[in-house]
Amino acid sequence: MKSLPRFSGIFLGFLALAGLVSLASAATYYGNNSWARHRLPWQHGNSGGLSQAYNQGNHTNLVNKYSLDFTMSSGTPLLGITEGNACQVVEPNDTGLGRYVVETAPGLWAGRSGTDYYFYGHTSNTWVALCSSGNTYIYQGQIAAWSGCSGICGGPHVHISVLNPGSTCYCTATGVKFPTLSGLQFDGVPGANPPTRFYVSDSVMPGDDNTKPQPNFTSSIFSKWSSAGGLNNVGSPRDNGGGAGVHGWGNGVVQDFAGSGHGHGNGYGAVMLRNGTGTAWWVHGVIWQTYLNNGGAGSWLGYPTSDEFFWFYYFGVPLYRQNFQNGCIWFNTNDLGTNVDGYQSGSPCNS
């Protein structure tokens, strides 16, 4: 999939777009209040050019007067602005928003009553089910779709809007202003015609660290996330106290994730890469919780040296185990009871 170039250099002339971003200083990121829960819908470090803002172009009727269009290459991942139930609608060719995603979330998260309906329009493909088949829950920053030019479209871009009160039909409700969308905006790109404002998102993707506005990328963590099941299994980045991106912990770096539950535990875990090694490992579920309870990366256990794996049957009950530098953690699938031990003589971890 294509993604936009990551812009560097000095941002010149930060200006505010009324109703979208309120600037206090050029070094400030916006929308970080936990109640707001809204981010620009593309990868941290990438940029989208604002081609149509509020009440511009064909954004003038009751439904879309507060819509926003951002230009971007087809196939750019579109991430959840907030979290909630989502589904896709496919309109006839050359009609409306084409293939689009509808996401519902409490209006309270944007300081409103009722339910907000978020629209991601003109997509080329989506990760969520058709609305006729039910909803797919997506997290903020999770891939919901990929940009394109379906429907009535003059070039690849994403159309985003929010309706309240609304419905899954874009044609029947009244548009409202977005809450603050977090990220940075800057004016212009040399040679751009017409001049546009560009916006840098702070949504973190697997493998990205927390550096703003341009993240560093750790390919080993992304590779493990991908090979272990990606969105469907490992899940989306979450902030467990060190930021949603890759960050240091003990003798290495980690990235925290919230997934589907993995069949055991609460769905939380982390992909971990020890310094001086090239392979990352995924710790999750009840093993993750036991690892945290024993002090995590800063404890005697150290960093993982394997993924979770099937060990053996104990009186017909499957046991699963994960190895660490100085010991192992295992659990049974009957009651999810866990055990932890070192590599001393006679320890089960030596078998």
Image: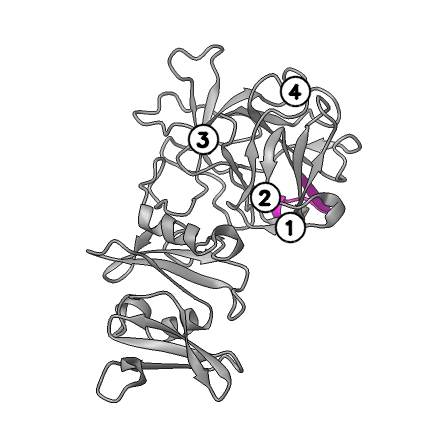
**Magenta stretch bounds:** 109-117
Q: Quadrant of residue 51?
A: top right
Q: Amino acid at mark 4?
A: Asn
Q: Identify whether 269 is placed above or below 19.
A: below
Cβ–Cβ under 8 Å for marks 2 and 1: yes
Q: Residue at x 52, y 46 (%)?
A: 142
For residue 127, which numbered disc appears in the image?
Answer: 2
What distance separates the C-alpha of mark 3 from that of mark 1? 24 Å
Q: Residue at x 55, y 23 (%)?
A: 156
- The residue wearing badge 3 is 2
Cβ–Cβ under 8 Å for marks 2 and 4: no
Q: Amino acid at mark 2?
A: Trp
Q: Quadrant of residue 153?
A: top right
Q: Amino acid at mark 3?
A: Lys
For residue 55, which numbered disc appears in the image?
Answer: 4
Q: Is residue 135 left or right of residue 261?
A: right
